[in-house]
Amino acid sequence: MFFERWLTERVVSLMSAFPVVMLQGARQVGKTTLAQQLITRGYLKHYYSFDDPATLEAAASDPAGFIETLPPGSVLDEAQRVPEVLLPLKARIDREREVGQFVLTGSANPIARFRMGEPLVGRMGAVTLYPLSQGEQVGKCERWLEQALQGQILHVEAEQDNLWERVVKGGYPNAVLAPAPQARTEWLNGYLDTLLTREVRELAEVQQVSELVLLTRLLAANSAQLLNQASLSRECGIPQTTLRRYVSLLEAMFLLTRVPAWYTNISQRLLKTPKILLNDTGITCALLDVDENRLLQDPLLRGRMLESFVGMELLKQIEFTAQRVRLSHFRTASGHEVDFVLEKASGEVVGVEVKASSRLDADDFRGLRFLQSVVRERWQVGVVFYTGTKTLPFGERLWAQPVNALWETA
């Protein structure tokens, strides 16, 4: 089964503006498939993968010669495996100055790891492909974010019988297409084993792989929570210096995202600690050995997984929109908090809360009301996503919406 990826249009747009486009994201999210679709549709012509031993050897033994003979309109798949090609690539595009020459894909961030991004500043556009969005899975191009940033909320009424199945399944194409839950679990566990015990060694020196696996499980248990490195260090027995390096490594592999704290010049004391999100709730549930039944029996875990699920769906919509939007969270020392804040570069603000409950009351909007009073005229709308079935007003520009409004709003 083929899934249309909504990021394709943005990649094509960047190709018309930059000589090089970097398509980055975790292993197995669909980068190769998207790149090959660009060839099928005539935007690119040639495909080279550094997962192929012969191609890898050719590029590694003579990076400059490899780049010089590369035909325009080429894909370089898994470019992080030969970061030495970046400097010759810079020299070539400086000489030729044509847009749309190359698309690089990477399942680990070669720029972050090798600090070689400086030569490509102004010459490369970069986008991140996440696991399949819920809209991509059902063939609906999501418009919730676009409309919310304009202060628009569409009335969506829908049953959510399969919501927890969606959370446990996640968005990795192979997991989504698995014929049964057991097959999905086996694929996810095999993927994690390969990534955390073998492929990680290509990126960094990890002496105790078991420590990295333990930390990843702890981060999964704390997904959508504040990143407290001192507490994690005590819990898993890893020194903070090593722990910080491991967290950065998981970020470079696109398995982990930090959601920064929202800030402003108001006099309120704002907490500045970032939140963490694992990039996929299917991966998170596999790490924790969680199925739908356990989610339904554990309110705390259910709330964290639903917040992680919504956060990642928002990140996916941010990535394939043409607008510059920043995702953050809001928390004050006095206890006001908002799970997610979406802010356009031009200043418009949308607040999002997530409640794993089918019933809401006015107190569930306390954080949103406070944030609304802070940003004033920049406020577009505040939404509490919940597991009920109706879109309901809770005050001026404050709404409750079913979670699936995120992808049913098209």
Image: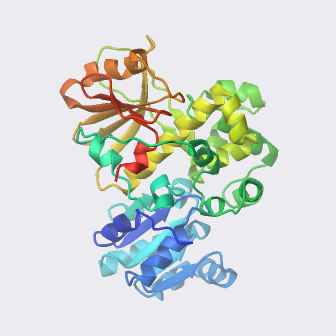
Query: 59 or 235, which is in the foreground?
Result: 235
Looking at the image, which residue is at 31% across and 76% down? 99
Q: Is residue 5 left or right of residue 61?
A: left
Compared with 321, 240 (above or below) is above
Query: 308 or 355, which is in the foreground?
Result: 355
Compared with 65, 261 (above or below) is above
Looking at the rendering, which quadrant does residue 372 occupy?
Answer: top left
**Percent of width and height locating residue 129:** 48, 59
Q: Is residue 318 left or right of residue 252?
A: left
Looking at the rendering, which quadrant does residue 219 occupy?
Answer: top right
Looking at the rendering, which quadrant does residue 322 occupy?
Answer: bottom left
Q: Is residue 206 left or right of residue 22?
A: right
Compared with 193, 259 (above or below) is above
Q: Is residue 193 left or right of residue 87?
A: right
Q: How many marks?
A: 0
**Percent of width and height locating residue 261:** 43, 30
Report whether residue 265 is seen. no
Can you say which quadrant of the picture contains the N terminus?
A: bottom right
Looking at the image, which residue is at 50% across and 31% down? 274
Looking at the image, which residue is at 46% across and 39% down? 403
